[in-house]
Amino acid sequence: MKFIGVDLGWISGPSGLCCLALEGESLVLRSLDRKASFPEVLDWLAAIAPSPSPAIIAVDAPTLIPNKTGMRLPERLIHQHFRKYHAGCHPANLSRPFAAGLIQFARDLETQGFVHAPTIQPRQLGRYQVEVFPHPATIQLFKLSRILKYKRGRLADKVSELNRLRTYILTELPQHEPPLVVTALPTIPTAGKAMKAVEDQLDSLLCAYIGAYWWYWGEKRNWVMGDYQHGYIVVPCPPHAPVPVGDRP
């Protein structure tokens, strides 16, 4: 089984890509990459997880967008439960310029056999796609009091926060189940463009791990913010944590 993370460039930015594979009881890093366009991403996915091989693709981007305006249900729930950690997410609706491309990307994944999996039977082989969001996942998996702020701010601060993220990936994810076995990751550059490339790759690795955690545990250790009808985001949660209750449209 392969677990693929896609830190998708919403409009024209490059996308970070990661592939983890389950070997025995552990996850191993097979590939970290970055592609400039959606067609290149889709070609990469088709090569690394050709049909009918089992895989789950975890995408950091809204891929089910039913609402014409405003905010989707999963975004409202993320804000409700994670805003105190500064982990809110951007609203998605059909009027936004990125909407058509992201929806089409998910449809293209479906043509490769990857079905949406807002519910899942744990550890059952198949070809799935899910929407994920790294910020709340880091709060849960790394037990943080606030997100790692490597997206905005002074360059020196972003480098420092990315180094913290890299350290957490190397030290904390091996402690979870399934454990991630990784001994080396790219070092964090101090130049803006090079740093952004590594940021995208580390985000894609987080996405891949979230996908693996969802496949391995299902709802036992994950929250699903939303549903197929309104859009959804899968977030890891601590064992035995109560399912959050949120508003409905």
Image (cartoon, rainbow, N blue to C red):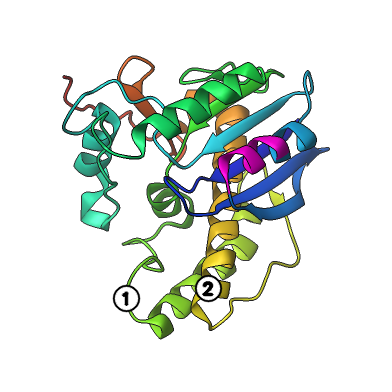
Q: Secondary structure at mark 2?
A: helix
Residue 153: which disc?
1
Q: Is residue 209 magenta?
A: no
Boundaries of the magenta span: 37-43
Whole-angstrom CA distance, mark 1 to mark 2, is 15 Å
Judged by depth in the image, the label closer to the viewer, 1 or 2, is: 2
Residue drawn at point x = 36 percent, y = 39 percent: 98
Q: Secondary structure at mark 1?
A: loop
Q: Which image quadrant is residue 161 in? A: bottom left
The main secondary structure of the magenta stretch is: helix
What residue would you read off at disc 2? 193
Residue drawn at point x = 74 percent, y = 23 percent: 54
On screen, residue 63 versus residue 124, left or right, reads left
Q: Which image quadrant is residue 61 in? A: top left
Q: Is residue 40 magenta?
A: yes
Report x, y in % for residue 145.
32, 62
